Amino acid sequence: MTNKIKKIAVFTSGGDSPGMNAAIRSVVRTCAFLKLECVAIYRGYQGMIDGDFKNMDARSVNNIINKGGTVLKSARCEDFRTKEGRQKAYDQLRANNIDAFVVIGGNGSFAGAQLFNEEFDFPVMGIPGTIDNDIIGTSFTIGFDTAINTVVEAIDKIRDTASSHNRLFFVEVMGRDVGHIALNAGVGAGAEEILIPEQNLGLERLLDSLKRSKKSGKSSSIVIVAEGDKIGKNVFQLKEYVEEHLPIYDVRVSVLGHMQRGGNPTCFDRVLASRMGVRAVEALIEGKTNYMVGVRDTKLVLVPISEAIKEHTKINTELIKVSDIMTT
Ligand code: F6P
């Protein structure tokens, strides 16, 4: 079958994540290797509507594999939510003879790509790029490994001062509605308690755990709190609550925020992104569309986008068991 795909666009969409640049580099270099033309779209779907395009060759992506963020910028785009906006985007792609696109982003970006394909029969392929690791169908999203390492390093630093002053710290981490960052970084950093939205243990359990920590001779504690946690109090309110009910504790708060989105990607994320970029281009020239490239048991898989956007990944209950044992 002759391959109809001669020119592929690549762009990043939604919240950025470390490793996105490695994925961009891989798509561009795979196109060059396969003698396909490649176009970068800046600023996500908004740039597609605006025609913010740049022709790319293998050299265009020099020295970016090690950089966090996305050189193609990212944006959330209200216009793309309208048929008129999507029509403008389609017209721009056609005017530039672009035959398909690779979107690097999260499930919101994939949902937009799927709708675009349905409306214009335009081939699309997704690469999962988000620190949340919340996309079903893949064991890892690009940026997750870097983010949990960033959080572990931050908590190690916080633990230095917590132990110097015999303090309890509430550390809030990202993850939107899921607790994967909190759980993995919490186990990795030896947090005394980990509060995640998937497990609402309640305030009493938290107080009991903190009392036990004190009794067991722990002079300082770290409680990592996922931003989507459902205990009903934010980290500042948790500080007040513990100070009121357990005055033995001297409590402080640290909200890690957007630093979790930055930093040089780990080797794991760079390799994952490089592998996924190759597979995304290959899948398009095989005539496939509406898939996300995922990884399961170290093997790359193609996941229908309709599946990938259906729900969030479930929390790792075996890791919760490990966490419970480690905090005895
Ligand atoms: O989805 C990635 C993420 O970093 C979430 O963990 C976080 O809740 C959200 O993006 C923050 O969004 P924004 O960058 O728009 O503040």
Image (cartoon, helix red, strand yellow):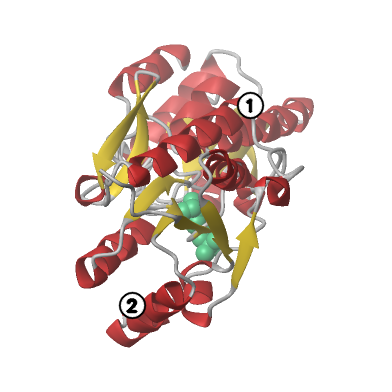
Q: Amino acid at mark 1?
A: Cys
* Residue 7 appears in the picture as rendered: yes
Viewer-nearest residue: 300 or 62 = 62
Q: Quadrant of residue 141?
A: top left
Residue 189 image point, x, y percent: 59, 23
Residue 294 image point, x, y percent: 36, 35
The local crowd at label 1, few if under 14, some if 14 to 19, many if 20 or more residues have their Cα within 10 Å, is some
Q: Amino acid at mark 2?
A: Arg
Q: Quadrant of residue 37?
A: bottom right
Identify residue for label 1. 267
Q: Give me the C-alpha separation between circle 2 and circle 1.
A: 35 Å
The local crowd at label 2, few if under 14, some if 14 to 19, many if 20 or more residues have their Cα within 10 Å, is few
- Say how many tags the image has: 2
Residue in the image at 43% along x and 26% along y: 209
Residue 60 image point, x, y percent: 71, 52
Identify residue for label 2. 81
Q: Is residue 34 above or below residue 214?
A: below
Tell me: is circle 1 under 8 Å from ligand 1: no
Viewer-nearest residue: 73 or 277 = 277
